[in-house]
Amino acid sequence: MRRLLQTECMYTFGMGEPTYPAARVVAERIRSRIAQQPGYTSTPGDAFIEEVISAAFWASLRREEGRVLTVSMALIPPEQVYRPLLFSTLLSLDPDVLVRLAPAVERPGIHLGVWIYEGRLCVWGTTRSVPTSCVVLEVIAPGLLVVKFRQPEPSTKFANIAVLEGSNVKFIAQRTDDVSELPPVLGPLLVFYSSGGREESDHVLVRLAISIRAHQRGGSLLVVPSGSDTWRASLVQPISYTVRTPSSEVEGLPPDSDALRGAVDFLAGWTAVDGATVISDRFALLASGVKIVSRDASRRIGKVLVTEPVEGSEPTIVELSQLGNTRHLSAAQFVHDQRDALALVASQDGRFTVFSWSESRKIVHAHRLESLLL
């Protein structure tokens, strides 16, 4: 049966589609990065990685019945996954096939299986499990692709390797800046991918960041110290929605439990309300729909330090006006006034920034993290 399936796979990609230049640029580096990971088994060669990325890119620019394509592909043979769903006929890896199959596998955790048969890349079926260090390519939006790999056990998470958006390519840095001066709640978010993300991958702040980004409405989340009310001085009074008896629904819940996922999504949902949402550093909801105001006009923030955990990115100090929209400006001002607080800001255009106070540099630090959270 396997020999029959192999001979039926007709490879047609490349006959009608132009080359995607960025795919050729990143293919060798992606294979090299994966080969360095613990548990590495096998990965297609550079040429095949380039072809997979090219097919995914051109497919991402198409629409099926008016809907934008989203799809995940695992570069793995079916023999290496648990209980694969095998098609009776192998399918060509080309944009038309990906567009047709995408609606069936658009939910999280389902991947199209792609591998090499007689020198050709084919879609062999689907899988809901992949082994350690398996390469996964996700189409997020038109022209926006993310290359990931499965982290070693006991983690069940994926770490990003590269983000491709048109001609712009970002490789995730394999080291992080010194996080010793940061509030303890922020450290796990910054080391989530670059350190391998075992226990850190279950940190609530990581889950909150992902959930906030997922509702796609944009939002601001202010994280303030428990037992303190000084944050109220930086908000317009009266506050529209406050909680009379704040309590955390998150603490003590088992990782990867439905209860924890529900509690995290509950908190993240409040950020879709117009205005910012305030929680304690123990993840108790305090207020929502709040408006930020500077406590002292003479302390208006002027500049911020911006970093991004991608290769080749250098810390940059920029004028506040270059930072982004009003949501970003007000969050930076809040952290400037409340220096023991954090502010997480998600934009509708996909950007995600965490603001914290850098005590060593005496400046608000804007951590651009969307490349990690895609």
Image: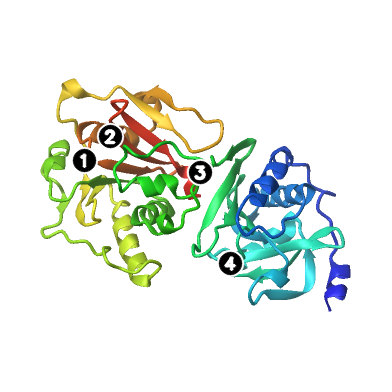
Instruction: List the residue tagged with mark 4.
Output: 110
Give me the residue at 84% from left, 66% from top.
9
Query: Which disc, if any, is residue 244?
Result: none
Circle nearer the N terminus (4, 1): 4
Q: Residues within 10 Å of mark 4 (few under 14, many from 20)?
A: some
Instruction: List the residue tagged with mark 1.
Output: 291
Using the rendered image of the protein, determine whether residue 350 is visible from the camera's viewpoint: no
Question: Is label 4 or label 1 in front?
Answer: 4
- Find residue 340 and report its image quarter: top left
Amino acid under disc 3: Ser
Question: Is label 2 or label 4 in front?
Answer: 4
Q: How many marks?
A: 4
The Cα–Cα distance between marks 1 and 3, rounded to whole angstroms, is 28 Å
Q: Are marks 2 and 4 in contact (CB under 8 Å)?
A: no
Instruction: List the residue tagged with mark 3.
Output: 371
Q: In the figure, is residue 169 to the left or right of 319?
A: right
